[in-house]
Image (spheres, rainbow, N blue to C red):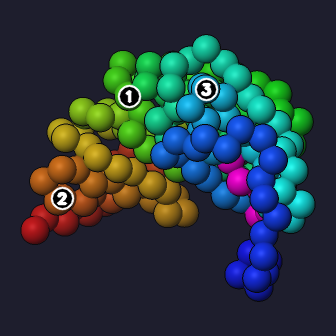
Amino acid sequence: DLLEKSYLPPLKGNSIIEVPLAVSGNKLCAAIKDGNIETWDLSTGELMHSLSKNGGSAAALAVGEGKLCVGYDSGTIDVWDLNEGTLLGTLQGHTQVIASLSLTDKKLVSSCWGEMIYVWDLEGGQCLHNFRIPNVSNSLICGEVLCSSNTAGQVELWDLETGSRLHYFDE
């Protein structure tokens, strides 16, 4: 448990980290300035994988259920097997920088700067729903509910199964 440790071993590998980071259990995933994504075992500090793909610079990461999702400035999203370090597939649909990713066991929500949020079925790699939300800035999954926010400070709640809006909060 990271909170109980008074000392973490140094991470071995490329130590020049960019902004995107994600943690799941004892695994840390980070975007590296050379374009790779590195994963470490936090209990030992050992580099597990150095993942590379020519998809541009990583802009967002999400990790969970043995998967690592990487959103790029090109608008594509790679889905990796976190344990094996193998590429499972690439999701395409966004045309702008991926701003945020949120992951559950079988679904991924991605938002890009601008107006689009996509809900993906990770097993089939298909887009289940897309939402046009002006000035979207962030999105996350809360159970079967999608929460989105925009640059005007508005928050919307959406049903992930039906795609219908459940609630709208304004300042």
Q: What amino acid is at disc 2?
A: Gln
Upstream in sequence: badge 2 or badge 1: 1
Upstream in sequence: badge 3 or badge 1: 3
Percent from the top left, x then y, of residue 106? 67, 45
On residue 97, which mark appears?
Answer: 1
Kindly give the residue lying farthest to the top in the view shown.
54
Name the side, left or right, on which 54 lies relative to 111.
right
Magenta segment, which residues? 25-29
Q: Quadrant of residue 8?
A: bottom right
**Label 1: few (<14), some (14–19) or many (≥20) C-alpha neighbours in 10 Å:** many
Whether residue 160 is in magenta: the answer is: no
Q: Nearer the viewer, mark 3 or mark 1?
A: 3
Name the side, left or right, on which 166 lies relative to 50.
left
Residue at disc 2, secondary structure: loop
Residue at disc 3, secondary structure: loop
* Residue found 77% across the figure and 53% down from its top: 11
Q: Is residue 25 visible?
A: yes
Q: Is residue 94 above or below residue 60?
A: above
**Label 3: few (<14), some (14–19) or many (≥20) C-alpha neighbours in 10 Å:** few
Percent from the top left, x then y, of residue 122? 66, 35
User: How far apart are the two marked residues, 3 and 2, measured between alpha carbons?
Assistant: 36 Å
Q: Is residue 106 visible?
A: no
The chief SS type of the magenta part is: strand
Upstream in sequence: badge 3 or badge 2: 3
Q: What amino acid is at disc 1?
A: Val
Q: Which residue is mark 2?
A: 154
Percent from the top left, x then y, of residue 162? 43, 46
Q: Which residue is mark 3?
A: 34
